Image: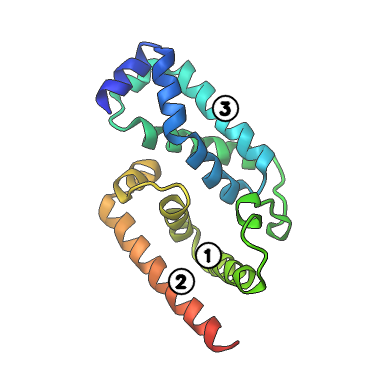
């Protein structure tokens, strides 16, 4: 990763392509969950890579360029949300979830998971989404969120426990 960071800092176009290939799809998927809009997710991914290119000299000090790209995207998403009035969550644009098989049982399961995720505190939900949807490791999540790795692991385990409990309880009430 240090070699990639060094190539990025030198402005190597192949290095930027490599970083883009390594994380753009996961970034976009995660941003869809955060922003509830495919257009906003597209804009934030684009702005993330523009910012990375503009501040490429800083990348020499970065240990993990993928985690750093998620950090930049997280900040860009927050900036966008501050500038705009967000859509209510009920009007969410989630093509990744909408493409799930139309079988009603699967749709109900997706809805139950989505509802359970919404119940989590924001700090726990973000960690679960970065792990499950963006595929980041707990160490990378710690870098993205600027939290100690132990805190990330604790919040992740607590979130999974809550989700499991809520999903089991919702199954019993059907």
Q: Is residue 55 left or right of residue 146?
A: right
Is the C-beta separation of discs 1 and 3 under 8 Å?
Answer: no
* Residue 4, visible in the rendered structure: yes
Instruction: Tell me: 168 left or right of 4.
Output: right
Q: Measure the C-alpha gap from mark 2 to mark 1.
A: 7 Å
Q: Residues within 10 Å of mark 3 (few under 14, many from 20)?
A: some
- Mark 2, residue position: 163
* Number of residues whose C-alpha sits closer than 10 Å to that of mark 1, classed few (under 14), some (14–19) or many (20 or more): many
Cα gap from disc 3 to disc 2, whole angstroms:
33 Å
Inter-mark Cα distance, 1 to 3: 27 Å
Asked if 8 appears above or below 167 in the picture, the reply is above
Q: Position of residue 14 (x, y in %)?
A: 41, 16
Residue sitting at 29 percent across and 46 percent down? 139
Considering depth in this image, is 105 or 148 the residue closer to the camera?
A: 105
Place of residue 174 in the rendered image (x, y in percent of width and height, measured from the top left): 60, 87
Q: Which of marks 3 and 2 is nearer the N terminus?
A: 3
| Image position of 139 (left or right of 48) | left
Q: Which of marks 1 and 3 is nearer the N terminus?
A: 3
Q: Name the residue under label 1.
A: 117
Residue at disc 1, secondary structure:
helix
Mark 2 secondary-structure assignment: helix
Mark 3 lies on residue: 47
């Amino acid at each position: 990763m240090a070699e990639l960071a060094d190539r990025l800092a030198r402005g190597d176009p192949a290095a930027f392509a490599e970083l883009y290939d390594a994380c753009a799809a996961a970034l976009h998927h995660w941003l869809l969950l955060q922003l509830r809009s495919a257009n906003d997710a597209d804009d934030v991914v684009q702005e993330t890579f523009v910012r990375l290119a503009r501040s490429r000299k800083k990348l020499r000090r970065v240990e993990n360029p993928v985690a750093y790209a998620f950090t930049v995207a997280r900040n860009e998403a927050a900036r966008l949300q501050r500038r705009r009035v967000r859509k209510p969550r009920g009007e969410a644009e989630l093509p990744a979830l909408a493409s799930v098989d139309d079988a009603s049982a699967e749709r109900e399961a997706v809805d139950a998971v989505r509802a359970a995720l919404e119940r989590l505190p924001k700090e726990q939900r973000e960690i679960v989404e970065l792990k499950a949807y963006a595929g980041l490791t707990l160490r990378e999540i710690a870098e993205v969120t600027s939290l100690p790795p132990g805190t990330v692991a604790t919040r992740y385990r607590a979130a999974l426990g809550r989700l499991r409990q809520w999903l089991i309880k919702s199954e019993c009430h059907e």
